[in-house]
Amino acid sequence: MTEPTDGVLRPSDHADSTPSGDGGDDITQPRLGVIGWMRWGWRQLTSMRTALVLLLLLAIAAVPGSIVPQRSADPNGVTQYFTDNPDLAPVLDKLSMFDVYTSPWFSAIYILLFISLIGCVLPRTKHHWKALRSQPPRTPARLGRLDDHR
């Protein structure tokens, strides 16, 4: 027969089961402190997943630059936009929508992206350099044993 379950069709010693007895076996996480939080933040920032999210965010952030006229490329278009939309234009101006590519929020996204990419690439450079300089693997003696060999 099977072991007794705790009501959710799992053995009593399963990781998700309720602790038996006193119930005081709660897991306590260690305190990270300032250095621990900085290390955690750096690892999050330099992960490839974060770099991809920042790249997507940069692409999305560039969309208003193609929809709203930009001061650097079309100052007359910005003036016309203020004339045509007197209520919306000041709000967009406060959000730096007429200067998207020089705005602080756009700069913050691409600076974080550069830091993330540098943090992803530099630690792996030594490994890739060694792989580039090493001898290639030997060719197998019997190629006919490989699946894709004809």
Image: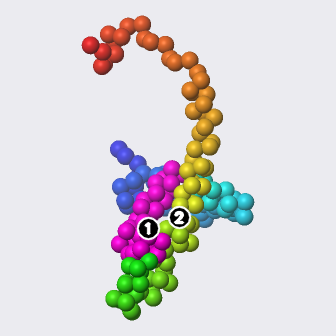
* Label placed on residue 109: 2
Q: Is residue 77 left or right of residue 22?
A: left
Residue under the point 30% across and 15% down = 149
Residue shown at 42%/61% (left/top)? 59
SS under mark 2: helix
Query: Relative to residue 1, is residue 91 depicted above or below?
Result: below
Q: Are marks 2 and 1 in contact (CB under 8 Å)?
A: yes
Q: Residue furthest front?
A: 76
When asked about the image quadrant of residue 7, the answer is bottom left
Mark 1 sits on what residue? 61
Residue placed most toward the observer, 88 or 37:
88
Q: Is residue 20 visible?
A: no
Who is closer to the viewer here, 32 or 103? 103
Task: Give the crowd class for mark 1: few <14, some 14-19, many >=20 residues within 10 Å.
Answer: some
Q: Position of residue 115 (x, y in %)?
A: 60, 55
Q: What secondary structure is found at the residue carrying circle 1?
A: helix
- Residue 36 is situated, as x and y percent measured from the top left of the image, at 69, 59
Q: What residue lies at 73% left-to-right and 60% top-to-bottom?
A: 35
